[in-house]
Image: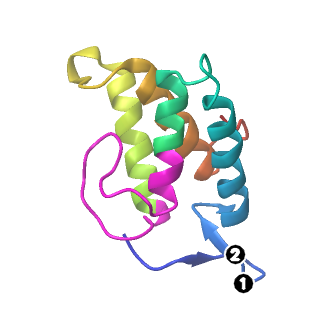
Amino acid sequence: MTTQQTGPHGDEHVGTRPRSQVEEAFRALEAVAAAPSGQTQLSRGAMTGYLWALGRGDVAPVTGAAGQGAPDLSALTAEADAATVQLEDATRRTIPRDYIQGVHAALAWVCGHSDERP
């Protein structure tokens, strides 16, 4: 965990995305999840990934690593990689697959590894 990253125009970034985009992605997903049938393990995982990336989580969503503040790009990438490992190896999985998939999708988008926003 480190200090805030800034983009080329001095705007605050979370991973490779402007903070405002990550905030909007979280709010949009939160609105969908507010419906009785909208909250799934997948959406919970994605929301948890976004919150952690924004620095609002005490521990990393997959590894449980403790930290303070918003994680830097290397920590975000490491957590996305940890999610990939658990998705590929069921014997290492300690939390539901759909939850891990949600975390992975959110962090992959935040890190710029995917253009598909959960």
Numbered label attached to residue 7: 2
Residue 33 at x, y = what percent?
61, 30
Q: Are marks 2 and 1 in contact (CB under 8 Å)?
A: yes
The image shows residue 64, relative to residue 38, as above or below, that is: below
Residue 31 at x, y = what percent?
68, 37
The residue positioned farthest toward the front in the image shown: 36
The image shows residue 20, relative to residue 64, as above or below, that is: below
The residue labelled by disc 1 is 10
Q: Secondary structure at mark 1?
A: loop
The quarter of the rendered structure image containing the N terminus is: bottom left
**Quadrant of the rendered structure where residue 11 is?**
bottom right
Q: Residue at x 52, y 77 (%)?
A: 4
The residue positioned farthest toward the right in the image shown: 9
Residue 95 at x, y = what percent?
29, 25
Q: Secondary structure at mark 2?
A: loop
The quarter of the rendered structure image containing the C terminus is: top right
The image shows residue 94, relative to residue 106, as above or below, that is: above
Q: Residue at x 57, y 61 (%)?
A: 15
Three-letter code for the amino acid on which mark 2 is drawn: Gly
Q: Nearer the viewer, residue 51 or 97?
A: 51
